[in-house]
Image (tube, rainbow, N blue to C red):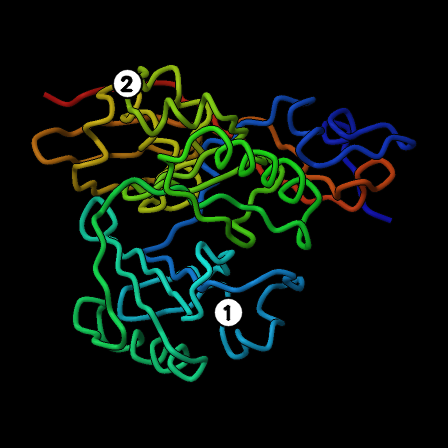
Amino acid sequence: MQNISKDINKLLPSPVDTPTCSEHSQTIDLDPCGTALNIDAVVLIELPLPWPKPVFMHPDLKGLESLMHTSMGVTRVLACQPRSNEQNLTVTVFCKEDATFERWVFELESDNSLMELVETLFFSKPENITIGKKITKNKEAVLLCAQGSHDICCGSKGNRLANQIEEQNNNIDLFKVSHLGGHRFSPTAMTMPDGRMWADLDLGTLGSILEKQIETEKIAKFCRGWVGAIKGPEQIAEIEIFKQIGWRIDGEKRDINVSTLDSGWSVEVLLRNERWNVDITPGRQVPTITCRSEGGIPFTTEIEYIVNSVNKAN
């Protein structure tokens, strides 16, 4: 039997209710900020459905893991639904260079070439690899979690949004990918080349993000974080500066330093010509429930964050 504190118990579904995790996160107004991955690269491997759970049980992905350390740094490996009818295996690599991610596409002739490419990435950057390489324009891309075999929410809400994108907006460069994490915020996605993760998306919100015309103060509530920062206070502070200075932050190198205090955290964010200080304290302890289980049990917990002040240094 799982121990449940009084504060957590207030935020759980009733014992007879069986909501999905994304329905419940909206019911308790779960804050997505500060919950993104912290990675340096993404490797997308095209793989026809169905996918097992975890996706790395698929025989074509044998020996791979969701997080791997490569020449590019911490690398997230994802399956991706094929985007064409071509027989060649396509691998797309997004690699962080300072502030944004560069895209490299590799057209491979066999599964053996896949293993050769992955092994080569351990000691060589994408620009130095010649295995079936094709460089593409560094255009905006959306990596949308749509793995129904991993989670009900991403399978339903993620695929519903993917269908709407394909029906109504052919200009969006869409990748339907395996588990990104954070299915309680489904539909959830990562945008490239900025490397931001987003929560609770719909077609209109996604369009506003890609067009970058909306004020960042209004869109920031959907931002889980920039993957170049560490989950928690670093990502919270970066989002606060995103709100303050707008979309231009996505093109700037960011150095983030966290000092732990008795009351919380003091975070310094250094840009090219600016220095910001963000004061953060712990917020609610909140549950992430199990989808469609009675009372949401078993569940895990994490904390939300409260931003007390944001100051630009002189």
Q: Nearer the viewer, mark 2 or mark 1?
A: 2
Q: Nearer the viewer, residue 158 or 246?
A: 158
Q: Nearer the viewer, residue 139 or 166?
A: 166
- In the displayed structure, does residue 298 sit left or right of residue 82? right
Which residue is under mark 1? 65
Give the residue drawn at x 72%, y 40%: 289
- Locate residue 144, reporting x and y percent: 49, 43
Q: Check disc 2 and give the amino acid type.
A: Gln
Q: Is residue 116 above or below residue 126?
A: below
- Locate residue 121, reporting x and y percent: 30, 74
Which residue is under mark 2? 213
Q: Nearer the viewer, residue 108 or 182?
A: 108
Which disc is residue 118 wearing? none
Q: Residues within 10 Å of mark 1 (few under 14, many from 20)?
A: some
Give the residue drawn at x 37%, y 22%: 208
- In the displayed structure, does residue 283 sit left or right of residue 156? left
**Residue 152 location, quadrant:** top right
Q: Is residue 77 above or below residue 35?
A: below
Q: Check disc 1 and give the amino acid type.
A: Glu
Give the residue drawn at x 54%, y 31%: 164
Q: Secondary structure at mark 1?
A: loop
Give the residue drawn at x 63%, y 62%: 51
User: Which corner quadrant holds the C terminus?
Assistant: top left
- Locate residue 150, reporting x and y percent: 66, 53
Q: Secondary structure at mark 2?
A: loop
**Residue 34 location, quadrant:** top left
Q: Earlier in the sequence, mark 2 or mark 1?
A: 1
Q: Is residue 240 above or below residue 172?
A: above
Per the model, the C-alpha gap separating discs 2 and 1 is 37 Å
